[in-house]
Amino acid sequence: MSDMSVSSHASLNDGNRIPVIGFGTYAPETYPKSKAEEATELAIKVGYRHIDGAYLYSNEAEVGRAIHKKIADGTIRREDLFHTGKLWCTFHRPNLVQKGLQRSLEALNMKYLDLFLIHVPIEFQPSEDLLPVDKDGNYLYSNTDIRETWEAMEQCKDAGLVKSIGVSNFNRRQLELILKKPGLKYKPVCNQVECHVYLNQEKLLKFCKENDIVLVAYSALGSNRDVTFGVGVGCPVLLEDPVVNGIAQRIGRTPAQVALRYLLQRGIVVLAKSYTEHRIKENLQVFDFQLGEEDMKSLYALNQNMRYDKMPMWKDHPKYPFHDEY
């Protein structure tokens, strides 16, 4: 079920490497943007070398400032840092993909990204609004062939603007569309999806491993409620789970460390998100202990195929990814 040893990096199918723990920079709109800058700066200071961002988060300028501060003070060099960005849903048309990427690069003040993902397979009409709607408040959808979007992603890699390209929130069928595309130049290196103790993604993980695609877990610690996107409403708090807490107490670790280590031992890259200093530090301290086989089985048994983020407001889009089981 698990590999007890966990390396600090995972190999990607294009020859690049990704740090197995990343720092997530998404925050609800209620958080001041300056928080993202402070937290990212602290994360780099305590040792994170993988920063996960996105155009959607509307804080790339702040995250970029934090990164440049840590480069300026000698903590890191740009080449020591692995930065992920994501193509937002208003830029799926092939002629807009590079424009979407350039927006992120300009905000971050970077020449390239280490990893660039299609954020969600769902597409909106081109717009300056993140979530374009008509006068009645209905989302303005679009539906470009995702394989054409992928070809434009490949061109971004060829242009040296990104080192690796991948996808996020894709189901198996959507991944297969790209993998079976005639003339495919680069396979997706990863699929970033919600994955945690309550949603173990076993089938999707198996499919990804068979195709040399890394599974990257967001909401690895469960998720805070975010009413804007209907996230986590009515769901249990993962870090309060009695099994997770029982294991944590017995081995002298935090529930978050146990939840992260569980995913790492299954060969999953994890994103840990916190804006609290001691938690930012603690979430990185997962390389100096192992979960035994019985603990892994106990955690595996907690799976409920439960999503915190079902994106219910977009379920009428033809590319809504969560109708399928995986």
Image (cartoon, rainbow, N blue to C red):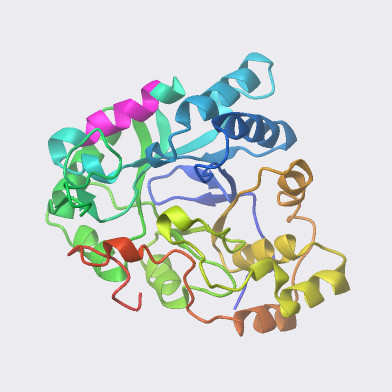
Q: Is residue 160 visible?
A: no
Asked if residue 180 is positioned above or below residue 135 in the image, the reply reads: below
Q: What stretch is highlighted in magenta?
A: 97-106
Residue 326's quadrant in the figure? bottom left
Using the image as rendered, state which of residue 192 and residue 42 is in the foreground: 42
Q: Would you say residue 34 sits in the magenta stretch?
A: no
Q: Is residue 106 left or right of residue 275?
A: left
Asked if residue 82 is positioned above or below residue 102 in the image, the reply reads: below
Using the image as rendered, state which of residue 45 and residue 61 is in the foreground: 61
Residue 293 location, x and y as percent? 71, 80
Using the image as rendered, state which of residue 59 and residue 11 is in the foreground: 59
Q: Is residue 98 left or right of residue 183?
A: right
The residue at 22%/36% (across/down) is: 97
The residue sitting at the top extreme is 72
Using the image as rendered, state which of residue 310 and residue 4 is in the foreground: 310
Q: Main secondary structure of the magenta part?
A: helix
Q: Would you say residue 102 sits in the magenta stretch?
A: yes
The residue at 79%/56% (across/down) is: 288
The residue at 13%/34% (across/down) is: 95
